[in-house]
Amino acid sequence: MKIKDIKMKKISVPLNTPFRTALRTVESIEDIIVEIYTDTDNIGFGEAPPTGVITGDTIGAIKGAIEDHIKKSIIGMDIENFEAIMQKLNSCIVKNTSAKAAVDIALYDLYGQLYNTPLYKLLGGFRKEITTDITISVNEPEEMVRDSISAIKRGYKTLKIKVGEDSKKDLERMKAIRQAVGYDIALRIDANQGWKPKEAVNVLRKMEDADLKIEFVEQPVTAHDIDGLKFVTDNISIPVLADESIFSPLDALNILQKRAADLINIKLMKTGGLYNALKICSLAEIYGVECMIGCMLEAKVSVTAAVHLACAKSVITKIDLDGPVLCKEDPIKGGAVFNESKITLTDKPGLGIKSILY
């Protein structure tokens, strides 16, 4: 099964409601789909979102990295020689993690097809169904309460609340939500780098004093401020999850060695795909640290790849893969089955993607 060609297309999928965080507001998913063609007529599918504010990747950058660097490096290689392909993919250009992730995902799709096996079984086969949280965008407290209640009515037991715009109002938001949903619902918060270290400790201690029962706080400080992240981790009892601070396995090792966070968030668009995500899983297992699997605002191709990883590895204990259920429509046939909070894999080879309606 040799790589014959790589093509790129764009999909546009509107969201049910605008997605708002401390960093950005998004109304539709505008992603690049990668299709890798082989001499056996197999097609591997991948996907990359232009999340410039986090990864630095734009539509133009993704296309350029694939067309001018990645494509030239791996055309003609055989999927059986998988390790060599991955070495080429990861060394042909620095950074550009979303472009690498899209190609990486498509290659793993082909790898599963080569052995006629669903990818999660090749990677570990721990389970075939997972339960995700759902994200509540940062808005006025009253609107966030309405969104939270709506999610619970749809069967969600875990809510990930976006905060980080204003620490005083964030406390009001969380008090209002906890009062409205009660204590049978798990609440996670994601500050998206929105606080300063001392500010984070201050507001999180107030949340502890208010008995809000926060499961964990995600990326409370700026991504590069590892000392600040450790300061927060050392001074609150709420577990801290590192997200934007970790792109590579080396980033993860640095966090783990310094004990700068209690948990690690893996996102394929930051790691450059499954190849490096698997290395982060191994590091986390060595250090006894649990992982969450997350996504950017992505459609079902790349999120299906994340589902396969989550189903393969027991070290991934927390799931934040709600991207597809935030969409008004689903242009992808096949892949993981999303039924609100329940996500199930089929036994189709590779990712199980059949086709995409552009």
Image (tube, helix red, strand yellow):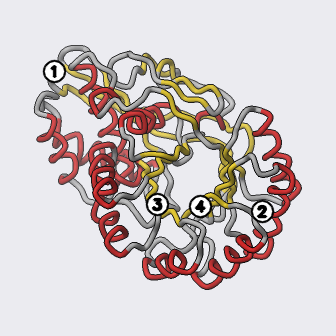
* SS state under label 1: loop
Q: Which residue is mark 3?
A: 263
User: First in sequence: mark 3 or mark 1?
Assistant: 1
Q: Position of residue 250 (x, y in %)?
A: 28, 64
Q: Which residue is mark 1?
A: 1
What residue lies at 57% left-to-right and 35% top-to-bottom? Answer: 131
* SS state under label 2: helix
- Amino acid at circle 1: Met
- Amino acid at circle 4: Phe
Splitting the image into 4 quarters, where does residue 165 fall? bottom right
For the residue pair 297 and 5, the one nearer the viewer reads as: 297
Q: Position of residue 197 (x, y in %)?
A: 57, 81
What residue lies at 68% left-to-right and 48% top-to-bottom? Answer: 159
- Left or right? Give the position of 278 relative to 8: left
User: First in sequence: mark 4 or mark 1?
Assistant: 1
Residue 191, placed above or below residue 320: below
